[in-house]
Amino acid sequence: METQVLWKSQKESFVQSLEYMRGRMDGKIKSIKTPWSKFNDATTDGIEWNSLTVIGGRPGAGKTLIKDQIVREAFLQNPDEDFRVLEFQFEMLGRTSAIREYSSVLGKSYKYLCSADGKLSEEDLTKCYEYAKKRVVFPIDIVEDPLTVNEFKEQISMYMKDNIVQTDDDAYYKKTIVTLDHSLLLKKAPFEKDKYDTLYNLGEAVTELKRKYPIAFIILSQLNRNIDNPERSEDGKYGNYILESDIFGSDALLQHADTLIGLNRPGKQKIRFYGPDRYVIENDRVLVMHFLKCRNGDNRMSFFRAEFEKMRVAEMETPAQQERRINK
């Protein structure tokens, strides 16, 4: 079999880059805006298509909260964009995710909506019905069955082909946000030695898919166990911060990620003065996004507030820094 020629003229890349820049300048090509200006400002005005965003954090840090809010508000934040959403929800049932969404909109707790913290009123149940009727018009699909990387890849390819847009003159793939609630919940294939192997294969699969299809991937990940070493919870230490090496399987995902975010909730670790700049952490609702890698943006640290009772995250001002006494 004759070997396929793979090289192309550099001219093609320059032509494509100028077309892309013109499209962005004219507003014909846009990123997916998130609900937070701080996030959009750190990246390329949001999440670019053909990209991978990885969010890593401890359990309970708010990773799913952030992912859910991006998806929940995506169609409202981007009314002129035509896209779909495909969610791989291996951690929780679609039913659970929907109740969390009602919680966010109504400002009521999950327990209340399940009549476990007072009986759910008929009025509030009706509000949930009304909200659901408005939401089901949006093209969001869910996969709940755990998959191997190859099965994950196959499902996405099938989904993209199943949603091809046909016009009189052309056919094209529909832009799609694809989320994976936890990379560790992918099943290990028989030929993979361990979870690190799985993550390496995931990174390669995502890179192949984002080059082929107009997909914006959002993948959630855990942190390595050394993040819980006692010295990393000591006030005012650099070790308070989330680092690239803290993301589980960082070597596997870092090279493939366009944006890598380390999410921290210092108050949950009893940290009062965060990092060497000693930011004052008032409570355990303060979230810190460490933008560790922004291929087309700026690395930085931004502060947010978790509103768990409403299942949402809000921006907040950068906290004050602890005053340091100078001995004379």
Image: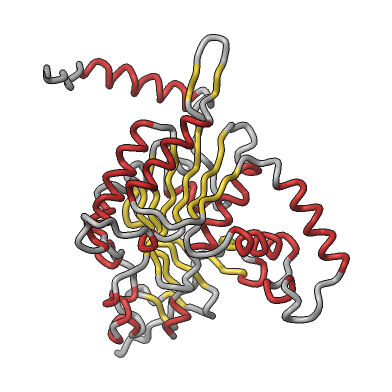
Q: Which residue is at a point 36% across and 37% down the rendered structure image?
A: 210
* Colour theme: secondary structure
Say which of 24 and 53 sits in front. 53
State whether residue 173 is above or below residue 109.
Answer: above
Residue at 24% across / 53% down in the picture? 200
Residue at 44 percent across and 21 percent down: it is 22
What is the quadrant of the C terminus in the image? bottom left
- In the depicted structure, whether residue 260 falls above or below residue 262: above
Residue 301 seen anywhere in this rendered image of the structure:
no
Lateral position of residue 169 relative to residue 214, left or right? right
Question: Quick one: 209 or 49, which is closer to the camera?
Answer: 209
User: Where's residue 120, x and y in %?
Assistant: 81, 73
For this rendering, which residue is in front, 86 or 32?
A: 86
| Quarter assignment of residue 290 | bottom left
Q: Is residue 154 left or right of residue 33?
A: left
Residue 271 image-quadrant placement = bottom left
Q: Position of residue 192 (x, y in %)?
A: 22, 57
The image position of residue 122, as x and y in percent, is 87, 67
- The N terminus: image quadrant: top left
Question: Where's residue 319, x and y in %?
Answer: 50, 71
Residue 325 visible here: yes
| 158 up-or-down from 306: above or below | above
Rendering quarter of residue 153: top left
